[in-house]
Image (cartoon, grey):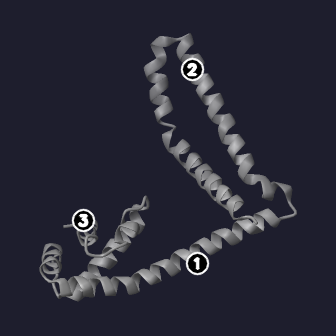
Amino acid sequence: MDPITIALGLAQFVPGLIRWVGGDDAEAAAKVADRVVGIARTVTGKEGGADVLAAIRADPALALQLQQAWLIHEVDLARQETRQLAEINATMRAEAASEDGYVRCWRPTFGYAVALTWTATMGAVSWAIVRDPAQAPAIIAALVNTSPIWGIALGVLGVAVVKRSHDKTLRP
């Protein structure tokens, strides 16, 4: 069994574990899964994932020990997350306080640039398909090849918008 599967099996005994394993960041989820599986192995004294799960299911005292051990570790994870958020917030506050207008406005500028680029791209694609419908499959295939670029741009834009919206709600 892989660590994520084992961790999801352990989630029934460890409240809040799913928060750390079920996120979008697969790498972070894998690290947390490895940690919780390691804790479970220490608590049960078993090595295999199936053995760990079986031992915890069979003995409520082991389930309680796992919960207690995980809570100690979860506090550390929460501290790491708090430090990361503090860094992000400090960066955003520095941007907002900057005397340089562009530094203060880079997020909206980036948003408008992405919107303009997307509109131009979709307009050009639509025009090309209407003009020469026989080329539609090749045009759409070429457009699909731009997915990684758009994924990155829209991901950055999404973070910028969400964080900016969050900042605005925190203002007095």
* x and y percentages locating residue 33 in the rendered image: 32, 72
The three-letter code of the residue at mark 1 reads: Arg
Q: Of helix, strand and loop, which one carries label 3?
A: helix
How far is disc 2 from disc 1 in space, using C-alphas?
A: 46 Å
**Residue 19 in picture, x, y percent from top left:** 40, 67
Q: Mark 3 points at which residue?
A: 5
Q: How far apart are marks 3 and 2 (CA)?
A: 44 Å
| Quadrant (top left, top right, bottom left, bottom right) of the N terminus | bottom left
Query: In the drawing, does residue 94 fall left or right of residue 53?
Result: right
Q: Where is residue 141 in the image (x, y as percent from the top left)?
A: 44, 28
Judging by the rendered image, the residue that carries numbered circle 2 is 126
Of the residues shown, which amino acid type is indicated by label 2? Answer: Ser
160 versus 79 height, above or below: above
**Residue drawn at x 46%, y 83% as measured from the top left:** 76
- Residue at 52% across / 81% down in the picture? 79
Q: Which of marks 1 and 3 is nearer the N terminus?
A: 3
How crowded pointer 1 is (Cα within 10 Å; few <14, some 14-19, many 20+) is rated as few
Q: Of the residues under marks 3 and 2, which one precedes in the sequence?
A: 3
Looking at the image, residue 72 lies above or below residue 51: below
| Image spot of residue 104 (x, y percent) | 79, 58
